[in-house]
Amino acid sequence: MPPKLEFLARITERRAALRAELAALLPPKQPVTWEIGSGHGHFLVQYAQAFPEKLCVGVDIIRDRLNRSDKKRDRARLRNCHFVQAEAREFLDSLPAGVALREIWVLFPDPWPKKRHHKNRILQAEFLEALAGRAGEGTPLYFRTDHAEYFSAVAALIPALRTWRLDPSAPWPLEQETVFQARAPAYQSLVAVRTSHPARSAETAAPEPPPPTDPR
């Protein structure tokens, strides 16, 4: 099979498996508190303990982090906390119909500091629009980073969107130090809130196939 077709076949298979996993895991009409890049689970386990009425789901792409997170959750005997191996955009696209986002947490995401890599940052207009499509009015998005330029970029981006607004007075519901926060000499936080403006349709998981093989 040509590399491009093989790549697309793997993507299709992975998405189908993720959709099946989430359909079995998430009740169809229960809103979800979602942590993007949940790391070792320090924050989300504590959050699920503090708010047992909330269904909490963390995603990360690194299996070892998820294994550590699962152990923390199991020691705490939490039934309202789950961890899923997935890329954030594919997770969002794979959410079952009727499942809405109650809260969104993005804590110390990869800042991709080099300018040519900024396109890889998770918090961009397209992704925020896709989040808005699964979030009801008033849904908060909590963002924290130790990268000053990334923070400034997000803080400038949100006022330019019609589906989100900054809320400087919004409280931070729980302070729980993560591995990344413990390493940070300083950090900045903001809260954005979903407005009532309709979200436009946005594609969030369009993988690029590998480059063609050099014939040489």
Image (cartoon, grey):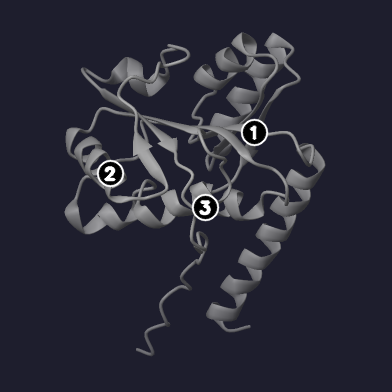
Residue 144, image quadrant = top left
Question: Circle 3 sits in a helix, a strand or a loop, which is it?
Answer: helix
The answer to whether 47 is drawn above or below residue 196 in the figure is above
Which residue is identified by label 2? 159
Residue for point 67% across, 49% down: 95
2 or 3: tag closer to the N-terminus:
3
Q: Quick check: 178 left or right of 31?
A: left
Regarding residue 204, the answer to whether it shows in the image is: yes
The answer to whether 11 is drawn above or below residue 83 in the figure is below
Screen quadrant of the C terminus: bottom left
Residue for point 42% across, 18% down: 178
Q: Label 1 crowding class (10 Å Cα cut-off): few <14, some 14-19, many 20+?
A: many
Question: Mark number for residue 89?
Answer: 3
Which residue is identified by label 1? 32
**CA gap, disc 2 to disc 3?**
22 Å
Question: Circle 2 sits in a helix, a strand or a loop, which is it?
Answer: helix
* Circle 2 or circle 3, nearest the eye: 2
